[in-house]
Image: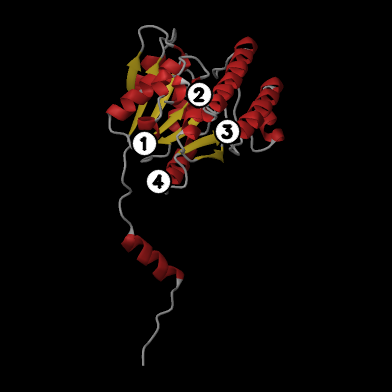
Amino acid sequence: MSTTVPHTLATVQEQARAEERPRPGKTIAVMPAYKAARTIELTVADIPPGTVDEVLVVDDCSPDDTVAVAERLGLSVIRHEHNLGYGGNQKTCYRRALESGADYIVMIHPDYQYDSRLIPVAIEIIRLGICDVVLGSRIRTRAEALRGGMPRYKYIANRILTFIENVALGQNLGDFHSGFRAYHRSVLEQIPWEKNSNDFVFDSQFLAQAVTYGFKVGDIPVPVRYFDEMSSINFRRSVTYGWRTLQVLWLFWLNKLGVWKSELFR
């Protein structure tokens, strides 16, 4: 006659602790910085302890004390001698992260617009194999985004572009234009992001490439914060960015249909 031991919560938790293994992989948070002296410390302070192995700041020749603040915080710092642009900044971030042996890379703007407490959530989704790329969506609801300070014209433009991108790329993302992005190493190793623009359209090109190469892209809600100190592009550059994003989608479909093979996708 056998005796069955009931699975109480205590025994289940004890068994789970006994089966725990150290989670493999090195995580590096990269911050493409420009004039972030007043916000970078706030962004770093919110990263949960033990979440990342290194925080790398790439300063794009800022005229303020961004480098001095980052060094005071004990972060890894690279400073461009000349301004290379937002995309050029990210290229330096990703090159160094790969050289440093990162298995998971989180790109987060150091302007405190995005909640860095969610970094471990994004990384865990990738570790579990659910996604290869995780974006932080600022637009859980319209009211929340506008209440967080997002300018109305940016909200409208974001909704229109995100809708078009979802249809064109076959995705269902809430925010294609997020400055919070997490990647598995394999994504950066396989897609040709070095061929991308050094300007803001780098992000749109990157996601179109990720879809082309068959990577799984998902998102998580991230509260939005807009205030005077945060970095932002003006209306004119926003229009240019939107137009160039539409061009990326056109190239994506020409490539997909075999009409014209773009360098971005090979």
Classed neighbour count for the residue bearing mark 1: other residues with Cα under 10 Å, few (<14), some (14–19), many (≥20): few
3 or 2: tag closer to the N-terminus: 3
2 or 1: tag closer to the N-terminus: 1
Disc number placed over residue 169 in the picture, else none: 3
The three-letter amino acid code for the residue at tag 1 is Ser
Kindly report the distance in space between the C-alpha atoms of the residues bearing marks 1 and 4. 12 Å
Residue of label 2:
205
Q: Residue at x 28, y 33 (%)?
A: 101
3 or 4: tag closer to the N-terminus: 4
Q: Position of residue 260 (x, y in %)?
A: 51, 21
Q: Secondary structure beneath disc 3?
A: helix
Specify whether 82 is left or right of 257. left
The three-letter amino acid code for the residue at tag 2 is Gln
Q: Position of residue 98 (x, y in %)?
A: 31, 29
3 or 1: tag closer to the N-terminus: 3
Kindly report the distance in space between the C-alpha atoms of the residues bearing marks 2 and 1. 17 Å
Asked if the residues shown at circle 3 and circle 2 are in contact, with their CB atoms under 8 angstroms apart, the answer is no
The three-letter amino acid code for the residue at tag 4 is Arg
The three-letter amino acid code for the residue at tag 3 is Leu
Disc number placed over residue 186 in the picture, else none: 1
Asked if the residues shown at circle 3 and circle 1 are in contact, with their CB atoms under 8 angstroms apart, the answer is no
Residue of label 4:
127
Q: Position of residue 130 (x, y in %)?
A: 47, 47
Asked if the residues shown at circle 3 and circle 4 are in contact, with their CB atoms under 8 angstroms apart, the answer is no
Q: Which is closer to the viewer, label 3 or label 4?
A: 3
Disc number placed over residue 173 in the picture, else none: none
Q: Secondary structure beneath disc 4?
A: helix
Kindly report the distance in space between the C-alpha atoms of the residues bearing marks 3 and 1. 20 Å
Classed neighbour count for the residue bearing mark 2: other residues with Cα under 10 Å, few (<14), some (14–19), many (≥20): many
